Image (spheres, rainbow, N blue to C red):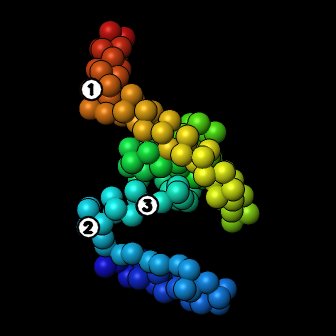
Amino acid sequence: RVRENVEYLDELRALARSLGIEALVSFHCSVSDARRQELMCKALALIYTPADEHFGIVPLEAMAAARAVIAVRSGGPLETVVDGTTGLLCEPTAEHVGRALRECVDDPAKAARMGAAGREHVCARFAAGPFGEHLQHIVDEQLQS
């Protein structure tokens, strides 16, 4: 495993201990695809916090599993998450991410609606067929110019 990831995991575990929430938090490292899918299906929403991250597949995987996505308003999620429809985009602060999570916890039906909309969105825009057609359109436009 990457040393930086191990160190960060240690920091997160220590933080959970210091906040007295250690029994409420679980960390799953290097899970199998089947286990990841199982966890995703049990989740109310996915929280995706990398700032200035490239495209990123994780929010698409969550939407494909019909889960709302809470993501920071930068990088890839700006292209994939429809704010207020398939999830919530927020500023990269604990307060803003916490508010977005609270919104989903307080209204699980809304989170479920965003998850369902996310599934429709990912199938319509990012499945192999639609994605390939869009890419072909871009290539055709570039060849014509």
Task: Tell me the number on the disc at residue 24.
Answer: none
- The quarter holding residue 18 reads bottom right
Which residue position holds label 3? Answer: 42
State the residue in front, 54 or 82. 82
Residue sitting at x 39%, y 28%: 124
Q: Farthest residue in the top direction?
A: 144
Q: Measured from the top left, where is residue 89 in percent x and y?
A: 62, 47
Residue 83 shows in the view: yes
Rendering quarter of residue 113: top right
Comes first in the chain, label 2 or label 3: 2
> Which structural element holds mark 1?
helix
Which part of the image, by quadrant, shows the C terminus?
top left
Percent position of residue 40, x then y = 40, 58
Q: CA distance from mark 1 to mark 3?
A: 28 Å
**145 relative to 71, above or below:** above
Residue type, mark 2 in image: Ser
Disc 2 target residue: 32
Q: Amino acid at mark 1?
A: Gly
Residue 48 appears in the figure:
no
Q: Position of residue 7 (x, y in %)?
A: 46, 84
